[in-house]
Image: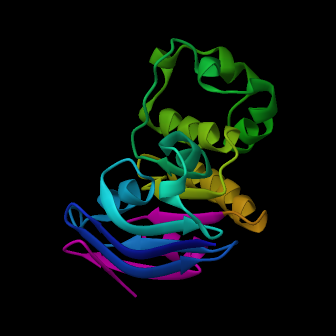
Amino acid sequence: MLSIRNLRARHVQVDDLDLETGDCFTVMGPSGSGKSLMLRAVADLDPAEGEVTLDGRERMTMTGPEWRRQVMYVGPESGWWEDRVGAHFEDPESVVGVLQRLGFKAETLNWPVSRLSTGERQRLAIARAFDRGPRVLLMDEPTGALDQAATALVEGVIHDFLMDKGIVLMATHSKEQAARLGTRTLSMAAGRLSA
């Protein structure tokens, strides 16, 4: 279970939120309402006060990298620091199945990053997150740059992650996506999260 109590970060307030395994909570709200800031605060990427726990273990008892390996933020734009796609994966061979489910062939790992379109980068960043074996995915507009077919592929791997006892907290502008994936939809307005 991911539990959030009295989370306070820059322009963001979350009073009380619990997500169980298999839950996908979608967060909707206008641009600038604080959805991304909230996800980054939960991931311990930005300074925040309050209590965030995973299965009863407080975020502050772990190092930042240890927490973020289990509670992973996947932003709308990802960083790429090596020339080749495969260099960004810890175990490239084990991720081939996820790549194929996201519409890529195994040889994609040999591609230069400079070749990637925005949508390909977004899907590969999701594959990279799965490569690290998180318990919770904090997804910030995971299909914002994708067409309908690619969106369906991403939603398929998210669905399978949930069936495998994962937890997802996702910002989206798509009511249809929230209806397809969300076990609960929340609203963000002026930095405040509400049911």
Q: Is residue 64 above or below residue 154?
A: above
Question: Quarter of the image holding residue 37?
Answer: bottom left
Residue at screen point 66% across, 14% down: 110
Q: Nearer the viewer, residue 130 or 62?
A: 62
Q: Nearer the viewer, residue 39 or 80?
A: 39
The span shown in magenta is 167-195
Say whether residue 63 is left or right of residue 167: left
Check the image and name the residue furthest to the bottom. 195
Residue at screen point 60% across, 59% down: 136
Residue at screen point 42% across, 56% down: 141
Q: Position of residue 14 (x, y in %)?
A: 35, 76
Q: Position of residue 140 (x, y in %)?
A: 42, 55
Q: Nearer the viewer, residue 120 or 165?
A: 165
Quarter of the figure with the C terminus: bottom left
Q: Position of residue 127 (x, y in %)?
A: 63, 40
Q: Is residue 177 magenta?
A: yes
Q: Position of residue 7 (x, y in %)?
A: 35, 70
